[in-house]
């Protein structure tokens, strides 16, 4: 292998060119995000106008007990996937749009989060027509997109400056759509009906992506649905004595996981179409489903000894009770959240979110992979001593 001096110089030049295009400071200057409680870093807690029933469940302890040490409005004991992504890209935690940061709009320089806990992809009227209640909020992805447009008009003002901001940002599109199914399923609507929502949900996600690209966005990460058949709230609601409904290896309910996988397959087909439509955009699919499934399949590899039971909840076989929610007086909380995957029945612990983020950032759960050059430090999951 004889490297000539000339070759070596050429190699160095290539590296220097790379370094000078901004890769060193992390590839992305900002994260712009949309979604629901999987991604909300404080919108619902900061804006009571978004609330339907006047109370944010994540506004009381033990929410936040592991990391922030106080409730931030995040639906977990600590950080969310988006927080680990931000940290790995050398960026601060993504500011909620309604967070009222001390810098006002200036705090959006490094990111802004429009995700609202309880939000759906479809508009509220869609659910009202079908007798489905969203007791958390009326916010839909369409509302979040409207705020995005409002924010641009005050934050960057001219189309060219906005384009510049968006071109150097990465958009995290969700997860969104999970609640559209959650509300319907957990209010007793039949699978056939809920299945008919899937193409509609995906159409809304796709048209939002189209609009964002029109505004100048170049890089998007689009997550799929999580394995709802492993979620304590679903396991409690659909509990059955028919053993063949459960995956013997994980204890998750097969047909619900099949439902999530169906959504994810249709979403990926749509993303393929969008990639053809926008060859200059980078549209990354984030496989939350399989990044989470590996935790249920091999929990001990990740420091978990309790896969299906919620750490915080109101009792029952999965410690998930629709009437006694985490943080309320009669609920109990486990001693070591990091040994649990499920936090409060429908959301995951910081430990689980950290592993999911790790699987996205290190691979193999993003496609195409997030540019490794943009990952400054990878979140190092910590397994507590036993
Ligand atoms: C939610 O939407 C319904 C129906 O349009 C409306 O009656 C209600 O006031 C809305 N709630 C909030 C908090 O906006
Ligand atoms: C049990 O579940 C399996 C799988 O969903 C189904 O095929 C079967 O009909 C069920 N048996 C009863 C008795 O409901
Ligand atoms: C699970 O792990 C935690 C933390 O390591 C430990 O405190 C707890 O005793 C374990 N529980 C079981 C049932 O092994």
Image (cartoon, rainbow, N blue to C red):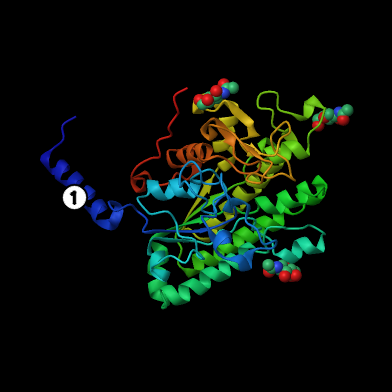
Q: Is residue 289 left or right of residue 238?
A: left
Q: Is residue 34 above or below residue 143?
A: above
**Residue 11 placed where, x, y %?**
20, 44
Please name the residue shown 62% across and 56% down the image: 56
* 318 vs 88: above or below: above
Q: Is residue 2 visible?
A: yes
At x 14%, y 45%, the residue is 9
The answer to whether residue 365 of the structure is visible from this angle is no
Q: Quadrant of ligand 1?
A: bottom right
In the image shown, does 169 or 88 lie closer to the viewer?
Answer: 88
| Residue drawn at the location 60% of the way across and 48% of the way down | 268
Classify residue 315 by image quadrant. top right
Query: Percent position (x, y) of residue 156?
Result: 40, 74
Q: Is residue 323 left or right of residue 106?
A: right
Picture quarter containing residue 146? bottom right
Q: Is residue 117 left or right of residue 16?
A: right
Q: Residue furthest front?
A: 329
Q: Of residues 296 and 7, which is closer to you in this image?
A: 296
Q: Extreme left residue here?
A: 5
Q: Say above or below: 33 vs 162.
A: above
Q: Does any atom of ligand 3 lie closer than 8 Å to the CB of label 1?
A: no
Q: Which residue bears the numbered disc 1?
A: 13
Residue 111, image x and y in percent?
42, 60
The residue at the point 74 percent across, 54 percent down is 197
Dot 1: what SS?
Answer: helix
């Amino acid at each position: 292998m004889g490297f000539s001096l000339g070759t070596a110089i050429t190699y160095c030049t290539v590296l220097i060119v790379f370094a000078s295009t901004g890769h060193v400071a992390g590839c992305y200057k900002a994260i712009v995000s949309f979604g629901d409680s999987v991604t909300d870093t404080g919108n619902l807690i900061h804006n009571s106008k978004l609330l339907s029933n006047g109370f944010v469940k994540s506004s009381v302890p033990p929410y936040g007990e592991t990391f922030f040490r106080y409730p931030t409005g995040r639906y977990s004991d600590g950080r969310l996937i988006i927080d680990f992504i931000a940290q790995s890209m050398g960026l601060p935690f993504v500011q909620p749009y309604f967070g009222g940061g001390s810098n006002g709009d200036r705090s959006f320089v490094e990111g802004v989060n429009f995700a609202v806990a309880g939000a759906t992809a479809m508009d509220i009227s869609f659910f009202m027509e079908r007798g489905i209640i969203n007791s958390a909020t009326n916010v839909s992805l369409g509302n979040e997109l409207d705020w995005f447009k409002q924010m641009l008009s005050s934050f960057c003002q001219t189309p060219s400056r906005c384009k510049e901001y968006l071109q150097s940002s990465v958009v995290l599109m969700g997860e969104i759509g999970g609640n559209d199914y959650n509300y319907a399923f957990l209010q007793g609507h039949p699978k056939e009906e809920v299945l008919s929502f899937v193409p509609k949900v995906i159409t809304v996600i796709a048209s939002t992506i189209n609009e964002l690209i029109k505004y100048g966005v170049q890089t998007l990460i689009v997550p799929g649905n999580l394995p709802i058949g492993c979620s304590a709230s679903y396991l409690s609601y659909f509990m059955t004595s028919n053993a063949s409904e459960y995956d013997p290896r994980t204890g998750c309910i097969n047909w619900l996981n099949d439902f999530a996988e169906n959504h994810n397959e249709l979403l990926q087909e749509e993303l393929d179409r969008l990639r053809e439509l926008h060859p200059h955009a980078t549209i990354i699919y984030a496989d939350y489903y399989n990044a989470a499934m590996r935790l249920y399949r091999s929990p001990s590899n990740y420091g978990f000894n309790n896969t299906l039971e919620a750490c915080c909840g109101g009792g029952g076989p999965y410690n998930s009770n629709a009437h006694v929610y985490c943080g309320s007086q009669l609920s109990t909380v486990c001693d070591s959240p990091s040994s649990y995957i499920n936090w409060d029945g429908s959301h995951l612990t910081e430990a689980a979110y950290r592993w999911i983020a790790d699987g996205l950032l290190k691979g193999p759960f993003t496609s195409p992979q997030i540019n490794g050059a943009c990952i400054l430090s990878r979140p190092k999951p910590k397994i507590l001593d036993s």
